[in-house]
Image (cartoon, rainbow, N blue to C red):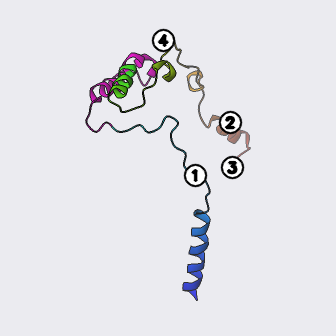
């Protein structure tokens, strides 16, 4: 009896989770194959170093990423696409970093609870 009940529960759960009707969508520009022969590894490594050096501010590494994507196109690792369509039409300069954070202005998480506790609102 218990075994039948467990099988019924399992069947209901399995049908519930497999009922998803969503179909996977292919990438917009097709596949982005792996570089098995390391044709563009040098460019990829220099791009990663640039990102690390610039604290992941990708606009500062625009020239390096452009060379990397050109290498991938030349080695048939991605579709031939004009770089202007990939966002390389203009040089990005003077991109400001958002520095206005609550923490910089003295915000402390949970401070409002401490104030309420002193007034007798909590606990």
Is disc 4 surrounded by few (<14), some (14 to 19) or many (20+) residues within 10 Å?
few
Q: Is mark 1 on a helix, strand or loop?
A: loop
Q: How far apart are marks 3 and 1 (CA)?
A: 50 Å
Is disc 2 surrounded by few (<14), some (14 to 19) or many (20+) residues within 10 Å?
few
Q: Do the residues labelled 4 and 3 touch (CB within 8 Å)?
A: no
Q: Measuring from the top left, give residue 35's x and y in whole percent.
A: 31, 36
State the image quarter where residue 34 is shown.
top left
Residue at which label 4 appears: 91
- 104 or 116, which lies in front? 104
Q: What element carries label 3?
A: loop
Picture layout, residue 67 above or below residue 26: above
State the image quarter where residue 2 is shown.
bottom right
Q: Is mark 4 on a helix, strand or loop?
A: loop
Res 86 label: none
Residue at which label 3 appears: 123
Q: Nearer the viewer, mark 4 or mark 1?
A: 1
Please state, as top left, top right, bottom left or bottom right, where the N terminus lies in the image: bottom right
Q: Which of marks 2 and 1 precedes in the sequence?
A: 1
Res 115 label: 2
Magenta range: 35-64
Residue at which label 1 appears: 23
* In magenta segment, residue 51: yes
Picture layout, residue 74 above or below residue 93: below
Q: Are marks 4 and 2 in contact (CB under 8 Å)?
A: no
Q: Distance between the residues labelled 4 and 3?
A: 57 Å
Q: Nearer the viewer, mark 1 or mark 2?
A: 1
Q: Nearer the viewer, mark 4 or mark 3?
A: 4
């Amino acid at each position: 009896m218990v075994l039948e009940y467990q099988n019924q529960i399992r069947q209901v759960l399995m049908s519930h989770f497999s009922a998803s009707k969503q179909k996977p969508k292919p990438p917009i520009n097709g596949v982005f194959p792996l570089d098995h022969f390391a044709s563009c590894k040098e460019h990829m490594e220099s791009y990663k170093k640039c990102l690390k050096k610039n604290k992941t501010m990708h606009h500062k590494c625009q020239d390096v990423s452009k060379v990397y994507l050109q290498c991938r196109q030349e080695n048939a690792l991605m579709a031939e696409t004009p770089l202007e369509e990939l966002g390389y039409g203009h040089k990005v300069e003077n991109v400001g970093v958002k520095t206005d954070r609550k923490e910089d202005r003295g915000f402390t998480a949970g401070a409002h609870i401490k104030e309420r506790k002193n007034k007798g609102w909590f606990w």
